[in-house]
Image (spheres, rainbow, N blue to C red):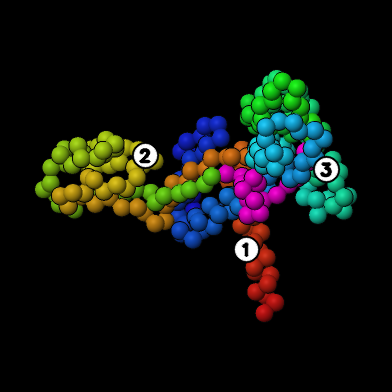
Amino acid sequence: MKIKILQKKGEKLVFLLDGTTPAFANALRRIMISEIPTLAIEWVDFHENSSALFDEMIAHRLGLIPLKFEPEKINFMDKCKCGGKGCPLCQVVFVIDKKGPCTVYSKDMKSSNKDVMPTSPNFPIVELLENQELRLEAVAVLGRGKEHAKWQAANAAYQYFPEVAVKDSKCDLKKVIKKCPKGLLEIKGSRLVISDPVQCDLCEACMGDGCIEVKGNESKFIFRVESVSGLKPEYIVKKSVQILREKAEEFKKQINKI
């Protein structure tokens, strides 16, 4: 099995996974989406809310704000040495105290942990008019995407690696090249190749006259991972591999008991 980074920019990562099966690729994808621990607001205690929005609506918005944090420094509550009572090692408290007229943004969330903050200061939460006020305390804890979408670490998807083969040696390759809507086909030497496999979506528009065949290699995958949490995409990929390994080891232990 081989991995090659194709693109890396900000919260997005594109890599090539070669020499495996669709089942393995899909297992990684599902873990990236649903099993990577992330931090999100779980409880909100309102002291004052005279805005136009109900408490529940503001709490929902707060829960969906992605938070930057150091994964090694935050514990799950049930695994923390406080015994689940809540402490700085398993909880982060945010305070909002604003009076209108103004718009309350994520930058107005004051954190009890200097290393934990929203991924952007510009997420709008609520607009306050004259004499309106918002005072609250919100508690963030670790969770997983399979429990609630607010803990989803990333959007992850893959596609088969596209490969082109000439079926008729007498066909006019120059005409075939022009049929690609994205202009991805080109001739290198005497071979017809796809210049940028990442952009090819296997639309088959170039296969109209049957001269060539473009199909996906089922042992080679182009993965796209975009972080929607405070975690870096490369961390999400590495963590998903670790979790999959742990699941396989646990399965092996259970099998040995039979």
* Residue 43 rendering spot, x and y as whole percentages: 76, 44
Mark 2, residue position: 199
Q: Secondary structure at mark 2?
A: helix
Looking at the image, residue 144 lies above or below residue 196: below
* Residue 29 rendering spot, x and y as whole percentages: 53, 52
Q: Residues within 10 Å of mark 1 (few under 14, many from 20)?
A: few
Is residue 110 toward the left or the right of residue 183 in the image? Answer: right
Looking at the image, residue 247 lies above or below residue 46: below
Mark 3, residue position: 89
Magenta region, residue range: 138-154
Mark 1, residue position: 248
Is residue 118 toward the left or the right of residue 217 in the image? Answer: right
- Return the residue nearer the eye: 10 or 21: 10
- Return the residue nearer the eye: 234 or 207: 207
Q: Quadrant of residue 62?
A: top right
Looking at the image, residue 251 lies above or below residue 134: below
Question: Reading the chain from its start, which is encountered first: label 2 or label 1?
Answer: 2
Kind of residue indicated by mark 2: Gln
Kind of residue indicated by mark 3: Leu
Labelled pair 3, 2 in contact (Cβ < 8 Å): no
Residue 163 visible somewhere in the drawing: yes
- How far separated are the C-alphas under marks 1 and 3? 29 Å
Q: Secondary structure at mark 1?
A: helix
Residue at left 69%, top 39%? Answer: 54
Is residue 187 toward the left or the right of residue 134 in the image? Answer: left
Kind of residue indicated by mark 1: Ala
Residue 73 visible somewhere in the drawing: no
- How far separated are the C-alphas under marks 3 and 2? 44 Å
- Magenta stretch: residue 152 in it? yes
